[in-house]
Amino acid sequence: MLIKPLTESTVLIILRSLNTRVKLPFSEKQNYTSLEKGYEGEKKYEAILVENKISDLILSDILLEKNNTFFQIDFLLISQKTIYLFDVKNFEGDYYIEKEAWYNAVGTEIKNPLDQLKRCESLFRRLMHDLGYASTFSIEAYLIFIHPEFTLYQTPRNLPAIFPTQLNRFISKLKTKSESSKLNRTHQKLAEQLVSLHISKPPISHIPEYKYDQLQKGIICGSCSSFINEISENKVVCHVCGYREGVDSAVVRSVEEFVLLFPERKITTNDIFEWCKVIGSKKTIRRVLRQNYTYFKHARCSYFVPQAEQ
Ligand SMILES: [Zn+2]
């Protein structure tokens, strides 16, 4: 049972937008691509857990803190006696391990996923201890390799990892166990506690510098992130993937993107008209803003604020 569903991180949303609107430096582009790929893998894993009706409590994408150290858990599953931590890796192609270091096919060393998993497990153990659950649950942590074309050479047999060829069997086992799992108020309370400890607005790091004037303006497709270049029957239409969306909803989505990228900038009709270039009618922009945001009238510059911030 999904208690906290997966959501895209703010960094991913910002980088996705920048990737369309500006030419990212090579390393940023790589970082963006790997975040996008990682998210894709997590979505796949979440879908598998949901499709298999795993009845244990599932928390996706939990960011916690212990001793001023942040640690992120892709999936946390609370069963009757065990808490499972899953770190999903969407690696594709051939990798190998040599003297405990991990390398990709061309021999470049990568961040050791096992070290990350161990660090996360150990911080989580300490957190559980602080919360008073140390003796209530055992904790098992696994790397989940979800991409069907992943191979890891020279793998020790005791690696806490589930490979693509083992995933079905592993999920069946989880499902069988979850069917006999008896959950009560304690499990529910722990899930609620962990959700309340989740840091929803982490400090944003690893974002390249950008300025409003440098970014290409326009509405980005809600499905494939290309620029929209056609409006038809009050809908924006993407020529790349065929995605269609009502003009109002596309403008609101673009304003949200604008606010995320430029939190210090005021939302004005002129700026949003420029930002949503393809719309071509200032009247439409003003109407959508008036309907969805709160209007503040000033002699020189009137502006809008999101309704929740009134
Ligand atoms: Zn598209």
Image (spheres, helix red, strand yellow):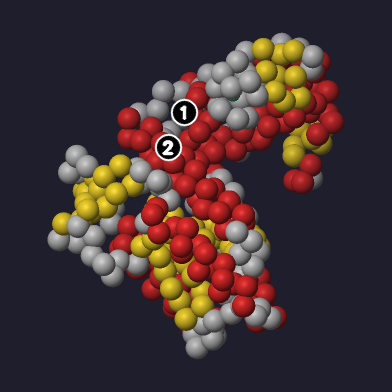
Badge 1 marks a residue whose secondary structure is helix
Residue pointed to by mark 2: 32
- Residue 89 in view of the camera: yes
Q: Residues within 10 Å of mark 1 (few under 14, many from 20)?
A: some
Secondary structure type for disc 2: helix
Label for residue 19? 1
Q: On the image, which quarter does residue 156 sit in?
A: bottom left
Quadrant of the frame with the C terminus: top right
Kindly indicate whether the residue at mark 1 contacts the one at mark 2 (C-beta within 8 angstroms). yes
Comes first in the chain, label 2 or label 1? 1
Tell me which residue sits at (49%, 43%) in the image. Answer: 40
Counting from the top left corner in percent of width and height, residue 116 is at: 35, 61
115 or 42, which lies in front? Answer: 42
Specify the quarter for ligand 1: top right
CA distance for labels 2 and 1: 8 Å
Q: Is residue 297 left or right of residue 25?
A: right
Residue 297 place in picture, x, y as percent: 82, 29
Location of residue 244 in the rendering, given as x and y in whole percent from the top left corner: 70, 23
What's the mark number on residue 299? none
The image quadrant of residue 298 is top right
Q: Residue at x 40, y 41 (%)?
A: 34
Residue at left 54%, top 86%?
Answer: 136
Between residues 168 and 112, which one lies in front from this camera angle? 168
Q: Is residue 275 above or below residue 310?
A: above
Answer yes or no: is residue 274 visible: no
60 sits left or right of 245 in the view:
left
